[in-house]
Image (cartoon, rainbow, N blue to C red):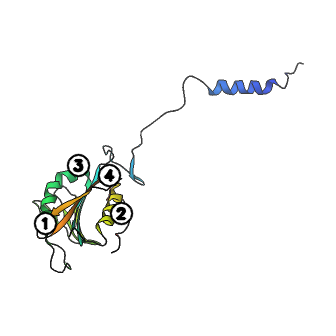
Amino acid sequence: MRVAPRRLGPAVAFAALWAAGCGTDPAISSYRVPRSTEAGQPAPPDAPAGDYRILGAMYPADDPQWFLKLTGPADAVAKNEAAFDKLAATLALPAGGAKAPTFTLPEGWKLAGPRSIHAETVRTPDGLEMTVTASVGGVAANVDRWAGQVGAANPAGATRPLDAAGVKGLRVDLRGPKNPSAGGMGPMMGKK
């Protein structure tokens, strides 16, 4: 009986493994996974990066005491932008600043009452929510916080002056890939 030399054993094993594992049809396949806007929350299938928006106003401009903040998908916020600007232009601060500001609601917008830290909540006809909140902290800290909520990489240039009923304010417009309503409030407002 003839026995194969031991040197051929590894070569035969390699040849058998190569023949079994190599071929012209690769075993790699691919598939599409929806990108995530927040941990565990898939983005809508048609939501490109930058598809969320925060449209806000801060009053008074130099030391904000009150915020208006409309958030949602960028296209839905855009549909309500003109009405938001009209509302923001009617805002009046009460003497002493202790009470919530007053403003004129655009047609179809409804008061929904106070909630949590919000002095007032307003609903647009298509279901977006605008909040009215007493502020803490300055302009830069709060613009940075909002930018973080929407995932805006560079908040520089996001503000512009706004004239309201007897008070100067700042209009804030930020866009980014994160849904600001999906992940909570984010970091709390800075201290004065």
Q: Which mark, residue 184? A: 2
Residue type indicated by callout 1: Ala
State the residue position of label 4: 176
Q: How many marks?
A: 4
Name the N-terminal-most of marks 1 and 2: 1
Residue 129: quadrant of the picture: bottom left
Front disc: 2 or 4? 4
Quarter that holds the C terminus: bottom left
The answer to whether the residues at label 1 and label 3 have Cβ atoms under 8 Å apart is: no
x, y (%) of residue 68? 22, 65
Q: Please indicate whether residue 85 sits to the left or right of residue 64 in the image.
A: left
State the residue position of label 3: 75
State the residue position of label 1: 164
Cα distance in 3D space between marks 2 and 3: 21 Å
Q: Residue at x 17, y 51 (%)?
A: 79
Front disc: 3 or 4? 4
Residue type indicated by callout 3: Asp
Q: Please indicate whether residue 136 sits to the left or right of residue 97 in the image.
A: right
Q: Secondary structure at mark 2?
A: loop
Q: Secondary structure at mark 3?
A: helix
Answer few, some or many: residues within 10 Å of disc 1's Cα (few below 14, many 20 plus, some between 14 and 19). many
Cα distance in 3D space between marks 1 and 3: 25 Å
Asked whether residue 151 is in view, the answer is yes
Q: Which mark, residue 34? A: none
x, y (%) of residue 39? 42, 55
